[in-house]
Structures are given as structure tokens and as C-alpha cells.
Image: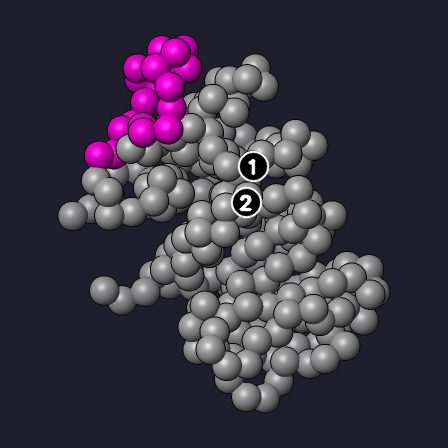
Amino acid sequence: MAIETVIESAGPVALVGGGAVPGGVAERVLALCGPVVAADGGAEVLLRRGRMPDAVIGDMDSLGATWARRVPATAMYPVAEQESTDFQKCLTRIEAPLVIGTGFLGPRADHMLAALSVLARFPERRCLLASDTDIAFLCPPELVLDRPRGERFSLFPMGPVAGRSEGLVWPIDGPEFAPDGRIGTSNRIEGPLHLWMDRPGMVVILPVAALEDVAAALAGSPARWSALAG
């Protein structure tokens, strides 16, 4: 069954979840984006900050009635099925060159892992997630980034994936990565960074200080993954 698009934008779209949404990071995310989407209880987070979401998408089991009544009915998009997370419901209904989300990486580990799983399942939908300490995104086929020497740079494979790198203290060229095999956490940047991946599945994790630089790099990169078969 085809999924109907709720929000379509030529620029980045902000997506706010109901998890931990640090105020300073939320402001940075909103400043980078045009339209704002709330994932279920994320609507309360936005309304408490004085921001009306352009759309609220989810199964609506986390948004209290008091807050729901503040949102125009035309902006509410309930999705009743329970086979997907609210994050997936939102991401698959947004058409944009980049979605920048917050409220999905913590504080619950199960919610964070579910969000990373969605990034791997829908590689054609470019998305950058931010918490109070980190950002995470699925590495595109090619990534060019200029960040300070010594900055932490971690890679975690969500499936079998191989790649090459320039600008890392420990290059990733060589054996294939896998979640139950070789991983690449706690690497360091030593110069202008250039990565290539042979297939989708590699999650990149950087300090949240890199949010704006990574958002620009992802939005401007012409190299994109296609949707996974099936």
C-alpha cells in the first residue's frame, strides 16, 4: 500500500519526538528547517515552546487530549497501525532533501535503537538525528566533511557494509563491517574527511557540535541511496 505524503518541502524539515528534547539543540534544529513535524507526543514538546507544528503524525497514544485540542484538526494525521514506530510513520510521510530530528536518541535505549533501525531500513530518506550530546545519521554513498582535528568520529554498522576513508586516524579500508563483527567506534578525525560506502547501513555518530556542518554536508551531497528492495 502506498504511503501518502503529509509534508513536502524543498528544504530541510524538522521532526520532533516525545523523547528527551534539549532546549538548545531544539532551537538549533528549528533554525535549520522550514516546516516542523511532531511525532505524536512531540507536539506537546513544541507547544510548550510556543511553536505550532505544521503536522502531527503518529498513533496518538502519547499526546494528551488537552494538548491535542490545541492543534488544528487539519494538522492531525493519526496512523492507527502498530507495526511501525511513530518515527517511521513520520519519516515515510515526509518528502524533503533532509529531515533533522530530535527527541529520538534518548533517554531510552530501545527507542534509540528503533530509530537507528529505521534509518537503515529507509536509506533513501536522508535524516539526521540530534541529542544533547551526539548526532547520528546513515552515511550516504559519499561524505565530505571538514571538522576539527581530534574530534570523535564513530561508525556503527546496522548490517554488512564496507567502505574507504581519508582523514581518519584509523582508516576504515579493509574488511567488511557488521554489527556482530568489526565496528568503528571512537575513531578520531585528523584532517579533511572523505568517506565512501559500498552499500547503505553505516551509522555515523559525531558530537552535537557538528550539527550544522553535517546538515549542510548531507543536504548538499548529490550522492544518495535508493530505496531497499522489498
Which disc number belongs to residue 20? Answer: 1
Question: Which color mode does the image show?
Answer: one colour
Q: Which residue is depicted at the point 38% across and 24% down?
A: 63
> Which one is in front, 81 or 218?
81
Q: Residue 103: x, y in percent?
A: 53, 38
Judging by the rendered image, the residue that carries numbered circle 2 is: 106
Question: What range is drawn magenta here?
Answer: 60-80
Instruction: Name the side, left or right, on which 204 lies relative to 167.
Output: left
Nearest to N terminus: mark 1 or mark 2? 1
Q: Is residue 95 visible?
A: no
The amino acid pointed to by label 2 is: Gly
> Which one is in front, 19 or 174?
19
Q: Residue 45: x, y in percent?
A: 52, 25
Instruction: Name the side, left or right, on which 193 lies relative to 79.
Output: right
Q: Residue 148: x, y in percent?
A: 82, 60
Q: Secondary structure at mark 1?
A: loop
Q: Residue 214: x, y in percent?
A: 65, 52
Q: Are marks 1 and 2 in contact (CB under 8 Å)?
A: yes
